[in-house]
Image: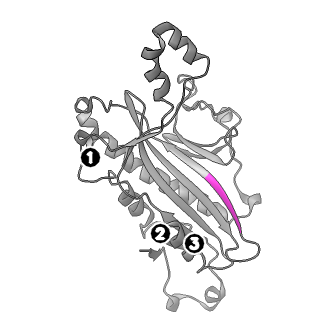
């Protein structure tokens, strides 16, 4: 089911003749929010080749093998029962929709459309031929880092121009949002009950992520209908004196968006990618490698 809501629309009866003839050139925003429960994910990250033989030599292969092979596997599991609440996704989808559908906000999109699948999204795009749209496909997960967990949001951002015309173009940008890691071990879930209680630290991070992502989307959508020549010049991490916790970031990477506690960086080593990282000052510890 698709629900569409016009944001900030003005009744036609109140419009003057000039306004009636002026088309609304703002793009449409199509949002595919996460589906289902929040899963605990362990991403594959094998040991460097030079470390595996050394570890096997020190411990013996049969002892070292589990440690060597463990990070080769991509695993998705349910959260431990002790970490569960009545909201399977910790309320992330609802929080994101509430942030984006606030009628009182002066959003830069003409219409907000909520879609549940790729085919529904394509169908909605066909209703606005020759116009522009932003499609945001959002996924959320809780990354297992061993003795820590990290709330992580992935957003495939697609800028679609001149829809359903011979000149239609689509540009993909992969956005990754990282919340500060929480000290928690899935093997000992009862030791971190307070972190996962309803309205506890994890739920606070989820709520903050929804607000941060809605503000970032507004910034990106606002730039779609503005000529490139009028876009603001983006400062770099180096010029701002920021050192986020990022093993692939460089001082020359441009800062796309800056919030009090977060920096959104277009990463040169990962073309077409934007990382949203907790902000640190120039006096903070050096970046760690993920």
Q: Quadrant of residue 287?
A: top right
Residue highlighted by disc 1: 199
Query: Counting residues from the N terminus, which is met first, the one under dot 1 or under dot 2?
Result: 2
Residue 122: mark in rendering: 3
Query: Counting residues from the N terminus, which is met first, the one under dot 2 or under dot 3?
Result: 2
Secondary structure mostly taken by the magenta-highlighted segment of the chain: strand
Bounds of the magenta segment: 169-173
Left or right: residue 225 versus residue 71 is right
Residue highlighted by disc 2: 115
Residue 172 counted in the magenta span: yes
For the residues carrying marks 3 and 1, which lies nearer the camera in this image?
Answer: 3
Are the residues tagged 3 and 1 within 8 Å (C-beta)?
no
The residue shown at (45%, 63%) is 100
Task: Work out how far the residue at label 2 is from the one at label 3, CA to CA, in angstroms.
Answer: 10 Å
The residue shown at (47%, 53%) is 139
Are the residues tagged 2 and 3 within 8 Å (C-beta)?
no
Check the image and name the residue furthest to the top. Answer: 58
Left or right: residue 204 versus residue 86 is right
């Amino acid at each position: 089911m698709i629900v569409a809501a016009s944001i900030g629309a003005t009744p036609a009866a109140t419009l003057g003749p000039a306004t009636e003839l002026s088309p609304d050139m703002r793009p449409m925003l199509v949002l595919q929010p996460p589906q289902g429960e929040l899963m605990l994910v362990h991403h594959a990250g094998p040991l460097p080749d030079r470390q595996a033989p050394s570890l096997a030599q020190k411990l013996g292969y049969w002892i070292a093998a589990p440690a060597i092979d463990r990070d080769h596997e991509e695993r998705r599991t349910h959260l431990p029962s002790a970490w569960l609440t009545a909201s399977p996704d910790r309320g992330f989808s609802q929080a994101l929709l509430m942030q984006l559908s606030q009628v009182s906000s002066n959003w830069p999109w003409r219409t907000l459309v909520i879609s549940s699948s790729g085919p529904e999204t394509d169908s909605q795009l066909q209703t606005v031929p020759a116009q522009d749209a932003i499609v945001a496909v959002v996924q959320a997960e809780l990354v297992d880092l061993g003795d820590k967990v990290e709330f992580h949001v992935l957003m495939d951002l697609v800028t679609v121009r001149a829809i359903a015309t011979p000149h239609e173009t689509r540009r993909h940008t992969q956005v990754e949002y990282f919340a500060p890691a929480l000290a928690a071990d899935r093997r000992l879930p009862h030791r971190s009950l307070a972190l996962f209680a309803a309205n506890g630290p994890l739920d606070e991070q989820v709520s903050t992520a929804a607000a941060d992502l809605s503000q970032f989307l507004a910034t990106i959508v606002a730039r779609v209908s503005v000529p490139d020549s009028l876009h603001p010049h983006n400062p770099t991490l180096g010029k701002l004196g920021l050192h986020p916790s990022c093993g692939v970031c460089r001082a020359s990477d441009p800062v796309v968006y800056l919030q009090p506690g977060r920096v959104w960086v277009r990463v040169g080593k990962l073309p077409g990618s934007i990382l949203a990282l907790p902000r640190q000052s120039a006096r903070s510890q050096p970046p760690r490698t993920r």
